[in-house]
Amino acid sequence: MLELRSVTAGYDRRAPVVREASLTLAPGQALGLLGPSGCGKSTLARVAALLHRPDAGTLLLDGTPVRRWRHRAPREQRTAFGVVFQQPRLAADPRLRLADLIAEPLRATGRRDQIPGRVTELAEATGLTPDLLTRRPHEVSDGQLQRACLARALVLRPRILVCDEMTAMLDASTTAALVAAVERYRRETGAALLAVGHDRTLLDRWCDRTLHWHEVARSRADAPT
Amino acid sequence: MTRPGPLLTVRGLSVRFLMPGGRRIAAVTDARFEVAPGECLALIGESGCGKSVLASALLGLLPANTETAGSARLGDLDLLTAGERTLARTVRGRRIGLIPQSPAAHLTPLRTVRSQLEETLAELTGVRGRAALREAAERAAQRAAFPPDHLDRHPHQLSGGLAQRAATALALAGDPPLLLADEPTTGLDRPLVERTVDELRRHIEADRDRALLMITHDLAAAERIADRVAVMYAGRIVELADAAAFFGTPGPRHPYSRGLLDALPDRAFTPIPGLPPELGDLPAGCAFAPRCPRADTSCTELPPLAGSVACHHPVRPPVPAATPENARA
């Protein structure tokens, strides 16, 4: 259970990008958050995934208030989340082979023994063939790299998955394949999903419920139209 | 329907990248299509299928390690054999206008939109003199629905939609008969995608001598804008169809095209199994066979683009129309 109460966040305290946003994500729920580009939905997704400290407001994870963000957050809170971003190229270390990219969170949390098993499992779940696992990001397509980024997000078995425009750069078939992989994972584990995007058709099909940005946050007074 | 003679005629176009160690990447193989004045042809396919390489080949923008074959005739000029001098002085901007994939990266970050438009107009048209250029730039901006009061801004001060319009204004500056749009809507949100393709469509409708070749993986955008579609898979055009028939009834005939449409969230939302093949290691027969529900032994042989579809057992339209092509299917 994740609750955001009256969250205000941004990159300049005088001009917050998100104003007084509130939403609740129940266990196992798939919630879509729909809004035009530039509305602040990615910033809110980053706050929700403990990746950006809000200027004001409260965030409750299973009833416990979150007090620290990013690397300062306690590990059991941080690893409750898996995050997939819009642009896989910007979210992948170009030096790592895909297998190492997927295994990175296991390495970072001292679970090296699980690496071979989990990497094989997740490559299969996300549709990556074994020959792709030895390649570096520049040797694969955007779609293949995003599959690896999804595998990385699932490797620690998060209770909450945050997908920020996960499929915006991808073609229809890869989009359907990644959404199917997320849904299979959620069926097996009961994880909740916050899917942020601008495609109503996609979010309506994917999620139990789709909220529009104006139902979640106050609009910026100075926002252009 | 009678069509005027094609503006662009592509025949047997192939592009090979020669890699170190003698490896050859078959980026485009034997592409064949036409674009008529007043028409929009959408070239669709997954990323990495060779669409953008085809566009680069038409503009002579391929890197040095490529080998091309076939022809791409724009009027009396073969774009594939024309020299750099001819392409630079008579084709780019003048006969083909390029609308790029990421306009923000295409524009010069250090200069205002006005200064870039004026420079382009001075280069491509006969307009001379500061006042005349200023006026021409404002007219060019207006034509692409770029707000004149934003002309003095730098590219980073523009939203994605406005940067797109600035790039379109530049592409239209030389009044080229062929517009080539390479993934013009990637990363834009849905309302903006719709506005962008509607505006592109308007440039074709406003001047029936102009044609648009749009390269995209966004099927909804293609449906909105195209008269005809060409589907590309693993470097080959596997289906050429009328857009209304392709997206509506009877629907596409190639199993790959069908799979692409079935992946859409407002349709079955089921992916095509597997991954596209590597362009450096293509199978001898049909490249789609490993992922195809209809594949059988005949697929070990390469299907030619017979009529409008390159497949040994295309999907039959539900209403059997008595044309020689699907009678055989």
Image (tube, coloured by chain):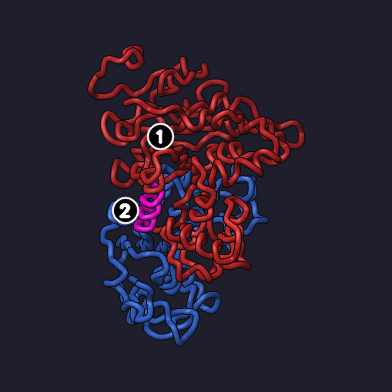
What kind of element bears circle 2? helix
Residue B197 lies in the magenta stretch: yes
Front-most of residues A97 and B286: B286
Circle 1 residues within 10 Å: few <14, some 14–19, many ≥20: many
Question: CA–CA distance between discs 1 and 2?
Answer: 28 Å
Front-most of residues B276 and B19: B19
Of tags 1 and 2, the one toward the viewer is: 1
x and y, in percent, of residue B195 in the image: 36, 55
Looking at the rendered image, the quarter that the N terminus of chain B falls into is: top left
What residue is rendered at 50% in x and 47% in y?
B175
Q: Which mark is residue A206?
A: 2
Above or below, B171 relative to B130: above
* Prevalent SS, magenta region: helix
What residue is rendered at 41% in x and 72% in y?
A40
Above or below, A55 relative to B92: below
Q: Amino acid at mark 1?
A: Val
Q: Colour of chain A?
A: blue
Above or below, A89 relative to A78: above
Q: Which residue corresponds to mark 1?
A: B229
Front-most of residues B227 and B75: B75
x and y, in percent, of residue A192 in the image: 35, 62
Q: Amino acid at mark 2?
A: Trp
Location of residue A223 (image quadrant): bottom left
Q: Colour of chain B?
A: red
Horizontally, residue B214 falls left or right of residue A71, namely: left
What kind of element bears circle 1? strand
Q: Which residue, as the protein is rendered here, is positioned at the far right?
A: B21
Q: Which residue, as the protein is rendered here, is positioned at the far left?
A: B319
Horizontally, residue A119 falls left or right of residue B293, namely: right
Output the chain of dot 2.
Answer: A
The boundaries of the magenta stretch are: B190-201
What residue is rendered at 49% in x and 80% in y?
A11
